[in-house]
Amino acid sequence: MLMKLFTPEKTELLNVTAIAPHRDGLIIHGRIMGAMPMKAVLTPQELRRTFQLFGPKLYWTLLLMLFKRAPRTLQN
């Protein structure tokens, strides 16, 4: 199963095919725009920095997203 990220115009930007432990954090495997393979490492420091971007409204949005269905145009 894949996780997909889309642009605001609803075109596919990134397919995440796997997330696995790595000695430096997590390694994320995927394909950019369906063609170019990529591997990215998410370090503990960068994960902590992510939470600095969050405010109360964003936490609420993330919680609600867990229960919301995707629009039909983005589903497979």
Image (tube, rainbow, N blue to C red):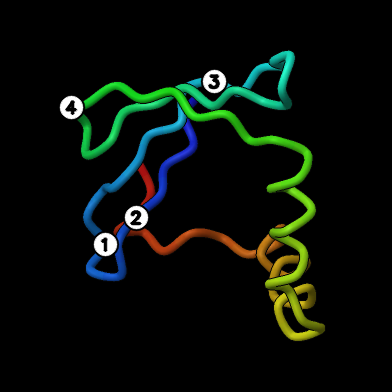
Q: Secondary structure at mark 2?
A: strand
Residue under label 2, please give it: 6
Residue under label 1, please give it: 10
Work out whether mark 3 precedes mark 2 in sequence or the reverse, and give the earlier one.
2
Q: Identify whether 7 is placed above or below 42.
A: below
Work out whether mark 3 precedes mark 4 in sequence or the reverse, and give the earlier one.
3
Query: Of residues 46 and 38, which is closer to you in this image?
Result: 46
Q: Amino acid at mark 3?
A: Ala
From mark 1 to mark 3, how far is it between C-alphas?
22 Å
Residue at 63 percent of width and 64 percent of height: 68
Work out whether mark 1 precedes mark 3 in sequence or the reverse, and give the earlier one.
1
From mark 3 to mark 4, how far is it between C-alphas?
16 Å
Q: Amino acid at mark 4?
A: Ala
Picture quadrant of residue 38: top left
Q: Amino acid at mark 2?
A: Phe
Work out whether mark 4 precedes mark 2 in sequence or the reverse, and give the earlier one.
2
From mark 4 to mark 2, how far is it between C-alphas?
15 Å
Of discs 1 and 3, which sits in the foreground? 3
Residue 2, x across and y down, in percent: 47, 29
Residue 57, x across and y down, in percent: 74, 85
Residue under label 3, please give it: 18
Residue 57, label in figure: none
Q: Secondary structure at mark 4?
A: loop
From mark 1 to mark 4, how far is it between C-alphas?
17 Å
Residue under label 4, please give it: 35
Residue at 73 percent of width and 73 percent of height: 54
Picture quadrant of residue 61: bottom right
Residue at 79 percent of width and 53 percent of height: 48
Using residue 36 as the reference point, say whether residue 52 is left or right of it. Answer: right
Q: Identify whether 3 is placed above or below 71.
A: above
Whether pointer 2 and pointer 1 mark residues with C-beta atoms closer than 8 Å, the reply is yes
From mark 3 to mark 2, how far is it between C-alphas?
17 Å
